[in-house]
Image (cartoon, rainbow, N blue to C red):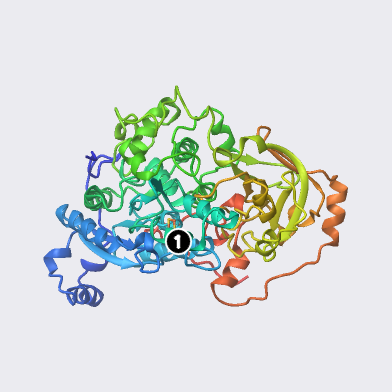
């Protein structure tokens, strides 16, 4: 049961405020007549919407996005909650970023979704928003948009899929998808057996059921205070997911009445809380990018190195794939995010505000792990320090990331020769049985960053070369300027910035150069002097994308690097919906 202090945020007196929607529906002029008349055309009588908080339900439902295929059903429960609390719900579609089906990258379209949500919330007579999300980019994208519009909003995620099962063991998307494919490449699974596995992992609507990006972002949204406590882990098909949607609708009306906007919740303290939870749950490296983008929207001065600072005293607690053993359903049964926050205790800033109107500490009071194999205690963690390390060095002056909890511990300090491929070459090359590769090789892919990708596709989980697989090896150090799926595992360094396509140092690396990775020290270097790197950079050919229209042109013109969240520079910050645009004279 979620407890909320309806509409009463810390610092609020609880007094009712002017409704933004009254600018549409309560005016005695021609425009007011039109606004009311055309809403009535849908069968809504005047008493259903007049003088009531109007709640816009931004729905990322789509038949292309299997993870969000149940969100129309969930929207009905949000509406019931809104109506029960005295509000008027209006559902509207926004771009749905289907992680699996969308090309060239959902990260690029995350920003388009954010624009869609921001402008839809601002342009319509909404007093508050409910963001119905699930699949990887839908949660951060919608949240970024609501934050920039700064209209009171909260997120309702769709929850994880049912656990998959195959031959007596639980399997989850897409950690086990990768394992099945590796087994097939190694010859341990026949083509027929491999085909059989297509139907056992993804059994239902809902997002991937490991601690991938969708589960991570649902968890971090809760940690940020932007969704109801306990909501992230409820399975998609569980009746409590619908009940949570109902309560989200109730709380949206309360937020509207009190004008509790995202910018009042998303403070430095809430970002610190989210980073600590990210470390504790063994979450996705994608979360680093999304949190940096959100901080840019919130105008919070978040440095990439803050992830390392907080890691130092944040233990890894959650034993979920791809880092550990279990799936999201077991995480839910063990207590979910409130239990993780409870176990982190004083490391969390309990005074941070949330959409319940209560503080984080009030939301999770008394909540602890109900299963210590799934959520460990801080006194008995899986590791003393958190999941993700930000690397620096002459190969990544603006940063790179590695998820240590999903890596081969023996390779976290490694020195080996580079074997370099461009993005378009790597798949074919790694299937070559005669590839010149050894277990010490550092496999590098470049040309898959925010500009080169474009949009930084999740191709950084480079295949272990067939030659090594056949020798019994299943990991090697891999480095790229791409991202990796939150469900992936292995000693994989991603998000190298600046990327090769804009002349980053990765573009200068040649086969045989010695790469030095030292995760403990937080460094990633190529054994070349500054002069050598500068000289090689001067020899690089320069290319620019030949695109002059559409969203792609906007992306190429404005996309930021990974360390700034891959957002568009023109989208950082906020334009509060209640603010007026000021005009400047063009005369000199
Ligand atoms: Fe949607 Fe994994 S594909 S969450």
Q: Is residue 10 above or below residue 571?
A: above
Residue 26 position by quadrant: bottom left
Q: 209 or 363, which lies in front?
A: 209
Q: Secondary structure at mark 1?
A: helix
Residue 294: image x %, image y %? 49, 50
Q: Residue at x 68, y 72 (%)?
A: 545
Q: Can residue 53 be spotted in the picture?
A: no
Quadrant of the frame with the C terminus: bottom right
Residue 143: image x %, image y %? 41, 54
Figure label count: 1
Q: 478 or 470, which lies in front?
A: 470
Q: Is residue 98 above or below residue 38?
A: above
Q: 390 or 494, which lies in front?
A: 494
Residue for badge 1? 114
Residue 59: image x %, image y %? 33, 63
Q: Can residue 490 be spotted in the picture?
A: yes
Residue 526 position by quadrant: top right
Q: Look at the numbered disc 1 and say if its residue's Cβ is closer than 8 Å to ligand 1.
A: no
Residue 127: image x %, image y %? 28, 58
Residue that extends furthest to the top in the rendered view of this protein:
379
Mark 1 surroundings within 10 Å by alpha-carbon count, few (fewer than 14), some (14 through 19), many (20 or more) = many
Q: Is residue 87 left or right of residue 446?
A: left
Q: Is residue 441 left or right of residue 574?
A: right
Q: Residue at x 48, y 43 (%)?
A: 283
Tell me the quadrant of ligand 1: bottom left
């Amino acid at each position: 049961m979620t407890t909320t202090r309806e509409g009463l945020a810390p610092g609020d007196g609880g007094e009712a405020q002017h409704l933004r929607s009254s600018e549409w529906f309560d005016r005695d002029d021609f425009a007011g007549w039109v606004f009311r008349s055309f809403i009535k055309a849908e069968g809504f009588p005047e008493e259903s919407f007049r003088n009531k908080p109007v709640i816009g339900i931004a729905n990322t439902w789509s038949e292309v996005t299997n993870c969000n295929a149940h969100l129309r059903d969930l929207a009905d429960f949000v509406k019931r909650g809104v109506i029960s609390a005295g509000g008027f719900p209006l559902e509207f579609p926004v771009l749905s970023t289907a992680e699996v089906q969308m090309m060239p990258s959902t990260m690029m379209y995350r920003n388009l979704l954010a624009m869609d949500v921001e402008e839809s919330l601002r342009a319509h007579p909404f007093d508050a928003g409910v963001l119905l999300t699930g699949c990887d980019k839908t949660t951060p994208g919608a949240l970024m948009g609501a934050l920039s519009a700064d209209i009171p909003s909260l997120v309702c995620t769709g929850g994880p899929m049912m656990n998959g099962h195959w031959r007596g063991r639980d399997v989850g998307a897409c950690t086990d998808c990768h394992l099945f494919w590796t087994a097939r490449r190694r010859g341990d699974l026949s083509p027929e057996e491999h085909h059989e596995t297509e139907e056992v992992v993804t059994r239902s609507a809902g997002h991937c059921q490991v601690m991938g990006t969708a589960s991570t972002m649902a968890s971090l949204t809760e940690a940020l205070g932007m969704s109801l406590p306990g909501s992230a882990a409820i399975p998609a098909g569980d009746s409590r997911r619908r009940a949570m949607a109902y309560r989200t609708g109730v709380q949206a009306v309360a937020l509207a009445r009190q004008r509790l906007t995202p910018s009042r919740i998303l403070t430095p303290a809430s970002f610190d809380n989210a980073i600590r939870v990210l470390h504790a749950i063994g979450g996705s490296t994608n979360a680093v990018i999304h949190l940096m983008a959100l901080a840019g929207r919130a105008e919070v001065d978040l440095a990439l190195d803050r992830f390392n600072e907080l890691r130092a005293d944040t233990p890894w607690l959650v034993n979920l794939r791809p880092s550990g053993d279990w799936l999201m359903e077991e995480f839910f049964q063990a207590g979910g995010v409130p239990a993780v926050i409870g176990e982190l205790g004083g490391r969390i800033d309990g005074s941070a505000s949330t959409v319940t109107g209560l503080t984080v500490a009030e939301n999770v009071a008394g909540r602890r792990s109900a299963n210590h194999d799934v959520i460990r205690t801080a006194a008995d963690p899986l590791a003393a320090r958190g999941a993700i390390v930000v690397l620096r060095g002459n190969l990544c002056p603006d940063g790179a990331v590695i998820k240590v909890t999903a890596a081969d511990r023996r390779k976290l300090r490694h020195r080996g020769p580079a074997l370099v491929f461009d993005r378009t070459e790597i798949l074919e090359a790694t299937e070559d049985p005669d590839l010149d590769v050894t277990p010490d090789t550092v496999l590098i892919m470049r040309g898959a960053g925010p500009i080169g990708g474009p949009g930084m596709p999740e191709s950084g989980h480079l295949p272990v070369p067939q030659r090594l697989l056949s020798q019994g090896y299943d990991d090697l150090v891999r480095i790229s300027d791409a991202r990796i799926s939150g469900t992936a595992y292995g000693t994989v360094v991603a998000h190298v910035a600046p990327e090769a396509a804009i002349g980053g140092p990765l573009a200068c690396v040649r086969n045989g150069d010695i790469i030095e990775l030292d995760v403990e020290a937080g460094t990633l270097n190529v054994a070349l002097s500054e002069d050598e790197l500068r000289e090689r950079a001067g020899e690089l050919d320069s290319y620019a994308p030949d695109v002059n229209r559409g969203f792609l042109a906007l992306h190429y013109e404005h996309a930021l690097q990974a360390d700034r969240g891959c957002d568009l520079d023109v989208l950082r910050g906020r334009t509060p919906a209640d603010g007026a645009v000021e005009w400047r004279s063009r005369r000199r």
